Image (spheres, grey):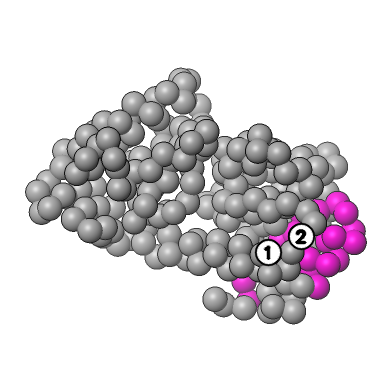
Amino acid sequence: MATNSKILIVEDDEPIAAYLQTTLEREGFEVVWLGNGRSALTHIERFPPDLILLDLTLPEVDGLQICRTVRQQRRYIPIIMVTAKGEDVDKIIGLEMGADDYITKPIKTRELLARIHAVLRLAQTSNSNTAQILRFQSLEIDIDGHQVTLEGQPVKLRPKEFDLLALLASNPGRVFGREMLLERVWGYDFVGESRTVDVHMQRLRQKIEPDPRNPIFLITVHHIGYKFAG
């Protein structure tokens, strides 16, 4: 992992922010700290970081809105929610908005660093895969050629089915909420229900899974959404 990765801390609690900044700078990261949600959005637009550590409760613009805005306006930037809220509903909402991971206060240094390195590794893998042919066991996905083969045989997919598969397979292991998939595949102005995702996922499983009832590629993450298990 490159030690010069740029991390933006968005946290309005100064002692916590100072601790995070000191810890990450000791690891070799370049760190910027902002305590205001609106200022953070401006900074992200001008100087996109490699990763964002994002508190939920912030002045002016809260963490969930920042997460949603980043996902709507910019290329993929890894986001880890850092918050005192530990209830499952907060975790689910954060992931639905597009966060990659979630850590609760009080923060444990080892856990924090492990999660940061894991998310950055995943982001680097995803970026390097986007221009390549993705291969997972007997499944092959040609992103640029817009083609899929299974055991050497072509698989006929509808455009949205391919886009959905390509997004998930380009981010193996990352959990996508249904709302996030609707935004990334169907577009931000799409008028429909999250059931649309489930229907397309069901069709995809019928076409690429050896046993659609026991999928090995397209995995359901209960109460949240889906991930691709490569």
In the picture, the quarter occupied by the N terminus is bottom right
Real-space CA distance between mark 1 and mark 2, rounded to the nearest whole angstrom = 7 Å
Q: Where on the picture, by quarter, is residue 28?
A: bottom right
Label annotation for residue 49: none
Region rendered in magenta: 4-22
Element at label 2: loop
Left of 68 or right of it: where is 209? Answer: left
How far from the left and from the top, in percent, is residue 100? 57, 51
* Residue at 39%, 25% in the rendered image: 196
Element at label 1: helix
Q: Is residue 118 visible?
A: yes
Q: Classify 10 Å Cα crowding around label 2: few (below 14), some (14-19), many (20 and above).
A: some
> What is the three-letter code of the residue carrying label 2?
Ile
**Which residue corresponds to mark 2?**
107
> What is the three-letter code of the residue carrying label 1?
Leu
In the picture, the quarter occupied by the C terminus is bottom left
Q: Classify 10 Å Cα crowding around label 1: few (below 14), some (14-19), many (20 and above).
A: some
**In the rendered image, the vertical position of residue 111 relative to residue 1, given as above or below:** above
